[in-house]
Amino acid sequence: MGHWQPGLIVILGPTASGKSALALDMACRLDLPILNGDSRQVYRGMDVGTAKATPAQQRLAPHCLLDLRDPDQPMTVQEFQALARQCILRFHRRGITPLLVGGSGLYLAAVIQGLCPPALPPQPALRRQLTALGQLHCHGLLRCADPVAAHRIHPNDTVRTQRALEVIYGTGCAHSLQQRRRPPTYPVLEIGLAPEDLHQRIHRRTAAMVTGGLLEETQQLMERFGPELPLLQTMGYREACQLLKGRMDRQQAVAAINRRTRRYAKRQLTWFRGQHQAHWLTSPQLQHWHILNQDLRQNIVDLVRKPTDGPPASA
């Protein structure tokens, strides 16, 4: 029998696909910690709009890499990568295989594939200038300077557009040319979620967010960090801002969030299917451990349990 070593189980997929529910079920059954792989859940105060695990859910299983910074303190992919590696190493030293869960492609690639982003800290003065220019103009600049990066970054994605320009101006080299890869040496098992009822899930998620405090959360963020906070231009928050400013009514805002989320989910699926070798699941009931096929469950157990351990009772 070969030498056993702890690894990493990754649950990835588009927004609203059921990643968090499946991760929590697996974590509770197999006694595993959950690591956040969502680029917005690293920020404090962005809970409802990012579908962050509730305090009650976080009490059921250890959750890491959440609430690392305030929203006005941008975190680069490289900074997240370093924190994630440290966290994984701590669990590996204890013989524990953690769960990495999220839908942020670059964050996951940084950890799973060893993507090496440029070591350039945020440039606040430059970001203020880019914000003043406006997203339309900035994405046009990116298309001229780095067409490859511009193709990968959606025209409405302010955060990633500004970061790509920041790297170009700060290093003199295209952002897309500075991404090397050093994959981890530990075993990685990827599970991809692509439920057939994704659009219905998105609509239910949006309705739950709006009734669950998205407007109040957005108002608090605007009051504390100002309406020009870049993260307030991200999915859900931008539409909530428009509603709060009287530029949309509630029905228009919900429709806009649904439309934008569906488009984002489509891009996520395209990215994940092209970049990852995942075990793809499409059942509408994917949030439960017992729905996974027996071979996949056994692969997970083999990665989680040392050969000298008995199988978990729930396997």
Image: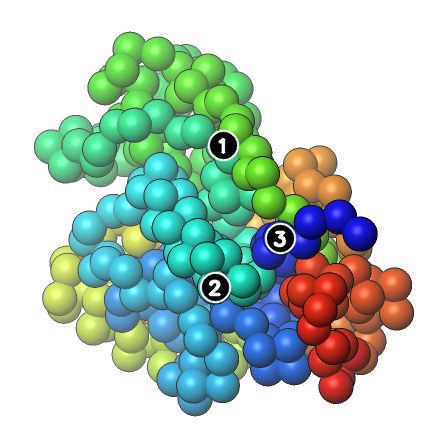
The type of residue carrying mark 2 is: Arg
Q: Which residue is mark 2?
A: 94
Q: Nearer the viewer, mark 2 or mark 1?
A: 2
The x, y position of residue 119, in whole percent, is 30, 27
Instruction: Kindly identify the residue that appears in the image at 51 percent across and 35 percent down.
Output: 114
Q: Position of residue 113 (x, y in %)?
A: 57, 36
Q: Is residue 78 left or right of residue 36?
A: left
Residue 115: numbered disc: 1
User: Can you identify the residue that label 3 sits on?
Assistant: 5
The quadrant holding residue 218 is bottom left
Q: Secondary structure at mark 1?
A: strand
Q: Is residue 53 left or right of residue 302?
A: left
Q: Amino acid at mark 3?
A: Gln
| Disc ID at residue 46 | none
Task: Describe the element under mark 2 as helix, strand or loop.
Answer: loop
Marks 2 and 3, how far apart at CA: 11 Å
Q: Nearer the viewer, residue 114 or 244?
A: 114
Asked whether residue 184 is in view, the answer is yes
Mark 1 Cα shell of 10 Å, populated few (<14), some (14-19), many (≥20): many
Q: CA distance from mark 2 to mark 1?
A: 25 Å
Give the percent coordinates (x, y) of residue 292: 81, 70
Q: Which residue occupies 25% across, 47% down? A: 74
Q: Position of residue 116 (x, y in %)?
A: 44, 29
- Classify 10 Å Cα crowding around label 3: few (below 14), some (14-19), many (20 and above): some
The kind of residue on which mark 1 rests is: Leu
The residue nearer to you, when weighing 75 against 133, is 75
Disc nearer the start of the sequence (3/1): 3
Say which quadrant the C terminus sits in. Answer: bottom right
In-front residue for pair 120/15: 120
